Amino acid sequence: MNSPEPVMRPPLVVWIVSDGKPGHVNQSLGLAEALARATSAEIVTLPALPAWRAWLAWLLKRLPGSIRPSPDLIVGAGHATHVTMLAARRAHGGRAVVLMKPSLPRRYFDLCILPRHDGVAADARTLLTEGAVNRIRPATARDARQGLILIGGTSPHFEWNSDAVQVQIKSLLARTPDMHWTLTTSRRTPDDFLAQLPQPPGLTV
């Protein structure tokens, strides 16, 4: 007796709503790409609409743009993506998954994946993570002589002090003379921060 043919499932379709900010897009891609490693998936990126167009699309149940495969998941990070996500779900179905604490009530979304530091309690619709979702994958081999310094910047959540951060970096370099550090900034980092930072041989910016 012949074995039954395996059932070929269609790929999971993930729509990413993008506000164009690299940090937000990378969070959404981090989730979508992780899903694609676990199962067959198709990832589609579409831009967030201006607020008035997004609300109009929600009211009309019609999303502008070219025809796309209907989504299973609609993923977005950043306040500017929220209404477009809801409009896309109303027009095409799927489940809306928001990353970071939304500006709209969480009950409007099917799932909220939020970093614990956002200060929101977990519930049936809210999954907490240690830090923000991202595209970084663990290295298979670690070089103990290589280090990474991630620099943030001005934020309403804490007071930024360039001088204090400079002192911390210099102290770290002095304590670890055998290591090579790579430093990277973010869009929040003050423009003059790197100009003030000395660049010894053990540091790559």
Image (cartoon, rainbow, N blue to C red):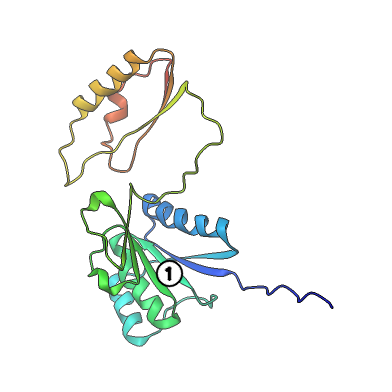
> Is residue 30 found left or right of 86 in the rendered image?
right
Image spot of residue 154 (x, y percent)? 21, 41
**Whether residue 77 is situated above or below residue 4 in the rendered picture:** above
- Residue extending farthest right: 1
Image spot of residue 35 (x, y percent)? 51, 59
- Residue extending farthest front: 1
- Quarter assignment of residue 69: bottom right
Dividing the image into 4 quarters, which one contains the N terminus?
Answer: bottom right
Tally the numbered discs. 1
The residue positioned 76% from the left and 77% from the top of the image is 4
Mark 1 Cα within 10 Å, few/some/many (few <14, many 20+)?
Answer: many
- Quarter assignment of residue 92: bottom left
Dividing the image into 4 quarters, which one contains the C terminus?
Answer: top left
- Residue matched to label 1: 74
SS for dot 1: strand
Image spot of residue 30 (x, y percent)? 46, 53
> Is residue 5 found left or right of 83 in the rendered image?
right
The residue positioned 23% from the left and 21% from the top of the image is 167
> Is residue 27 found left or right of 190 in the rendered image?
right
Front position in the image: 123 or 186: 123
- Quarter assignment of residue 170: top left
**Whether residue 100 is situated above or below residue 106 in the rendered picture:** above
> Is residue 116 found left or right of 40 in the rendered image?
left
- Residue extending farthest bottom: 60
Image spot of residue 20 (x, y percent)? 39, 57
Instruction: Name the residue type under label 1.
Output: Ile
The residue positioned 23% from the left and 64% from the top of the image is 103
